[in-house]
Image (spheres, rainbow, N blue to C red):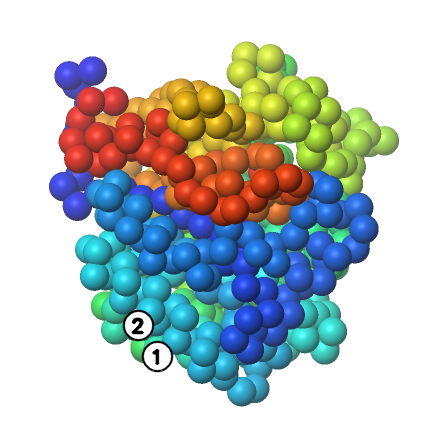
Amino acid sequence: HENLKAFPENFLWGAASAAYQVEGAWDVDGKGVSNWDKFVRIPGKTFKGTNGDVAVDHYHRYKEDIALMAEMGMKTYRFSVAWARIFPNGSGEVNEKGLAFYNDLIDELLEHNIEPILTIYHWDLPQALQDKYGGWESREIVEDFRNYCITLYKAYGDRVKYWVSLNEQNIFTRLGYQTAMHPPGVKDDKLFYQVNHHASLANAVAIKEFRTYVPDGKIGPSFAYSPAYAATSKPEDILAAENAEELSNHWWMDVYAWGEYPKASWEYLERKGLAPQVEKGDFALLKEGKPDFMGVNYYQTTTFEKNPLDGVTMEGTFNTTGKKGTMEDTGIPGLFKTITNENLERTNWDWNIDPQGLRIGLRRITNRYGLPILISENGLGEYDKVEEDGTIQDGYRIEYIRTHLKAVQEAITDGVEMIGYCVWSFTDLLSWLNGFQKRYGFVYVNQHEEGEHDLRRIKKKSFYWYKEVIESNGENL
Ligand code: BG6
């Protein structure tokens, strides 16, 4: 590997989390109710009815968690702000105690020389806005989002220099409006594209305002990028993969980078009567929202083949069983259909393990958009076991992260400009639909659906390994 370029000197080695998945304290210190607080209470929605009321209690234990981050030598920590902590009703009066919490969290990070990366929106919408006008279903949200963003910029912009606008717009809208697995639990294709248009406008507004309030900062969205592969070299499968890359990836990234929808996808949606309603000035605004970097959440590639006109739809569900082989195929009739890629190993939740796919994806983004890239998430969700001696031997996680980091280094060698790499996640946390059985952390948290759950933190084998990776700036992968 002597031909590989080294990681940049100031590379941001880190880990990420999201408010709802770690904080708990769901109704503490004036916080309002979020869409997730409500959704998880509907019977049957999550694994054993798990919710984030307590999560891993990061709200009360952030100092302990940050001390562990410092012990590991982490350079950056990506966390999200719960909108309903700042504005319990989504708009209106600010909740000072909510502002104070993140203020303290940011100071604590800086004291430990950890660069904060703040995600403005990681899926927990104030329920009041869902009730008032349907949340993302209405253009009204753009102004409330603007106000929320400006509040955060004014409060934290002096110290926080890296910001993520929306986390995985493609996923929260897909699961919220196509598969109905996330709030608000709707299946409506037309609405799905409309909601996305509003979210893209909100994203652009967030970036536009950022230039005024945090002129020396950097901001970008985090896109859940699953690069498309073709199942075979049959031209119809290649076309299916092209269709998928365009409608499932470029549909968002082109809007972020260029303020434009990709042509063939737009024409297709127009023909089907599914294209979003666009108002005068929208495209001009979208073009003003050019990000400083593309945030990439990478977990896997997806492989496609031709889908007949009466074929499968996007309604299919993801594997939430934790048993391999229970993933359903999805697709758009006439355009594409997913298939299992037999060349790849899979996790127990049927997520492909494909480090090369990361290198491919990073190069595609670089070639198409020319933006620097922050890997805002990458990691392995698996069952972990505490051994008799109290250790957690998660060699499988080390192998996953090591091979993906190698792919990042290869991409750097290929000329990709990388800002940093955040592992999902630092501590174990609530996996939205899968409870605490599907774990991602370097730090085990004794939290379960049933039985003992004293929330104590235990460093996993991967903790010590990543510490060394950081210390050596990734030299010995
Ligand atoms: C990303 C999200 O989609 O994947 C995270 O940004 C999420 O919030 C992560 O937890 C892993 O997904 P899951 O379903 O395994 O928890």
Gap in Å between the C-alphas at discs 1 and 2? 6 Å
Q: What number of labels is visible? A: 2
Residue drawn at point x = 29 percent, y = 28 percent:
465
Query: Which element carries disc 1, helix, strand or loop?
Result: helix
Amino acid type, callout 2 = Gly
| x and y percentages locating residue 183 in the rendered image | 71, 56
Residue drawn at point x = 46 percent, y = 61 percent:
59
Residue nearest the viewer, comparing 273 with 249: 249
Give the label on residue 157, or none: 2
Give the label on residue 154, or none: 1
Q: Quadrant of the C terminus?
A: top left
Query: Which element carries disc 2, helix, strand or loop?
Result: loop
| x and y percentages locating residue 253 in the rendered image | 48, 49
Query: Left or right of 97: which side holds 270?
Result: right
Residue 369 visible: no
Image marks 1 and 2: residues in contact by CB distance under 8 Å: yes
How many other residues sit within 10 Å of disc 2, few (<14), some (14-19) or many (≥20)?
A: some
Picture layout, residue 171 above or below residue 8: below
Picture layout, residue 461 above or below residue 152: above
Ligand 1 under 8 Å from disc 1 Cβ? no
